[in-house]
Image (tube, rainbow, N blue to C red):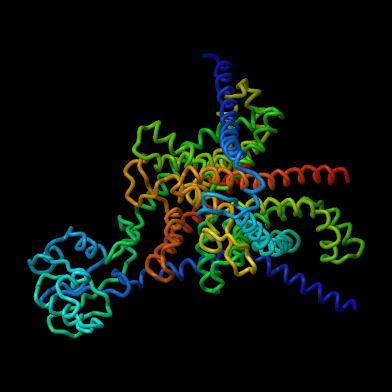
Amino acid sequence: MKRFKRILERIVESILTVSGAVTTVTILLIIIFLFREGLGLFRSPAVEKGYALCVNSSNTVDHLNSHQIKEIFDYEIENWAELGGRDEAIEVFRFDEIFSRYTDEELGADYELLPDKLGEVITSSPGIIAFLPTQYLPQGMQGVKVLRSDRITPADFFGGRQWIPTATPAPQFGVLPLILGTLWVSIVAILIALPLGLGVAIYLSELAGQKMRKILKPTIELLAGIPSVVYGFFGLVVLVPLVQKTFGLPVGETGFTGSLILAIMALPTIITVAEDAMRSTPRAMREASLALGATHWQTIYKVIVPYAKSGISAAVVLGIGRAIGETMAVLMVTGNAAVMPRTLFEPLRTIPATIAAELGEAPAGGAHYQALFLLGCVLFFFTLLISVSAEAISKRNFNKGL
Amino acid sequence: MSKKTNQGIAFWIFRLLGLIVVGILIWILGFIVWNGIGVINWDFLTKAPTDGMTGGGIFPAIVGTCCLVVGSMVVAFPIGVMSAIYTTEYAGNGKIVRFIRIMTNNLSGIPSIIFGLFGMALFVNALGWGDSIIAGSFTLGLLVLPLVIRTTEEALMAIPDSFRTGSLALGATKLQTIRRVVLPMAFPNIVTGLILSIGRVSGETAPILFTVAAYFLPKLPTSIFDQVMALPYHLYVIATSGTDLEATRPIAYGTALVLIAIVLMMNLLASLLRRYFGKKVKTN
């Protein structure tokens, strides 16, 4: 009986040990699944799945990257010479146009003659580039060359300045405008929140009486507890019109509105962490300063704040972390225009908001879906970087305290 | 200017900043309560939405949120408590426990939208559960895991070592000590953590966007593989995609008020419990 009990105990203890690894396992799983889906993007062709680009076989160009394709179909590039080919005007041909050139009878009842007719069109004009579904491709016809389409490269993704996931024939997955949007909104939010948060932290740790603490502490907890979608709703109904009126803008849904909401949301983090840091100032340092004749205020800004410097930096870093990852509130108030942000007073879009807004419409397994997961990877590394640096900063503080 | 006036000015500024923060909270809460209180009535809480979401109540969303709260707690609470028991009682103070703590910290720093992505990839697609309560519960459960672990750890660490050594000295094994002495004493604070987690889970939107939330689904779920509506998602949908603002705004205010009430009530309950049991443990 005793033996049985001991075995049971060992089993329970090993279960406990295994459960200790649960957070580590979760993080690993998150990494694995984000990357498994996300890295697939770099195996996707630049042209939409199920479609191909054809040119006349006399054309010397035989592959195009996604940016070039987009420029061609936007009529930004109009001559093959710009792409390293002959001096020949580009003629853009979209699949639908075949129906205006030929009647239904000419194409056959089940469109079985469609590939031949497409082939005719392509052979007859030397400057043509045709965007066709692969099922109607005029394969093996003389005079037709199917362009080898480049894959989407990391350079396209990380260096691209355009995020147009629904563009045909070549969707653009340039992440730069989203990264910039995220950083702008978050950093401005911290710039707004920092003076306020630091002031409140000083007030709480140094000046506030019992009564005021009893009001302020729960206030901060409540601010931290309000769900982000409620902040978003508040921002949408109150701040958006306010910003629009105050700055005389055409729309109130701007990056700045997002920064305002994020500033409020980051306040609890900044206040709590900074206050903890200031409270940990050794009593001896305070008293030494006061004994030397410094006023309380001089002690605060010459002794306590410098002492708590790394704790305050950690507060800033954590605040930025909270702001960068925030999804719903930002989604609801920033207007969601995926363009390179020039000023904060126009609509822009952040990484989390993009994921939330577009994942629902992206078919699973497609390039768009994979691009959104890759965005998730980028975001994941941002926040990991932030966690690690906050950890490093507060460790520095700890060593100094010894 | 003398040192004293400097100090006076600075301190007044700080006092003002403190008041501003209180003011912001009152502004937000006051705004929602003021606009939402008129909408709340029995029908609003117990009827399904009607007329293309421009009328009726939010009952299915309330039920959905309750399902998700229960589901995510079933996922997160046992494993979180066990994990915390391991780190505080067994792991000692070595490298392993430091590593686990860092990982828990990192997990709590991961944005909620990433959990949404992950939940969609693993639970909805790879495991084939589809958009369902179970997929959403697992996603939310993992999200709230660090909070459960941290509050449980704090509760366990608050128990003085003398109780443990006393029990061990009487011949109890380590596991018996944990089960009969440490856990019962820490129980109230563990429950406090559970309540805080419920508050957190019921307000999260981003993780459920792609794992469970339904845009409009007036019937109640019958199994864990059903989709449900949820309060936070309902608020998002009503606030952003309605065309008839005059009809949907009141519903949005009402939904926001119900959501805030649930979340804040949980926080309040947790802090009351903490205070109550805090006193009780001290007098022991």
* Residue at image location 53% in from the left, 33% down from the top: A196
The residue nearer to you, when weighing B216 against B180, is: B216
Q: Position of residue B270 (x, y in %)?
A: 72, 47
**Res. B108 image quadrant:** bottom right
Image side of residue A24 versus residue B90, left or right: left
Residue at the outermost right position: B170
The residue nearer to you, when weighing A15 against A86, is: A86
Image side of residue B50 versus residue B276, left or right: left
Image side of residue B83 versus residue A182, left or right: right
Residue at the outermost left position: A87
Residue A306 visible, this orientation: no
The residue nearer to you, when weighing B193 against A329, is: A329
Q: Number of marks in the image?
A: 0
* Residue at image location 13% in from the left, 76% down from the top: A121
Q: Position of residue B107 (x, y in %)?
A: 58, 58
* Residue at image location 54% in from the left, 67% down from the top: B131
Q: Position of residue A318 (x, y in %)?
A: 53, 47
The residue nearer to you, when weighing A45 against B218, is: B218
Q: Position of residue B197 (x, y in %)?
A: 66, 53
In the rendered image, the vertical position of residue A58 relative to residue B215, given as above or below: below
Residue B264 visible, this orientation: yes
Image side of residue B161 versus residue B92, left or right: right
Residue at the outermost top position: B1
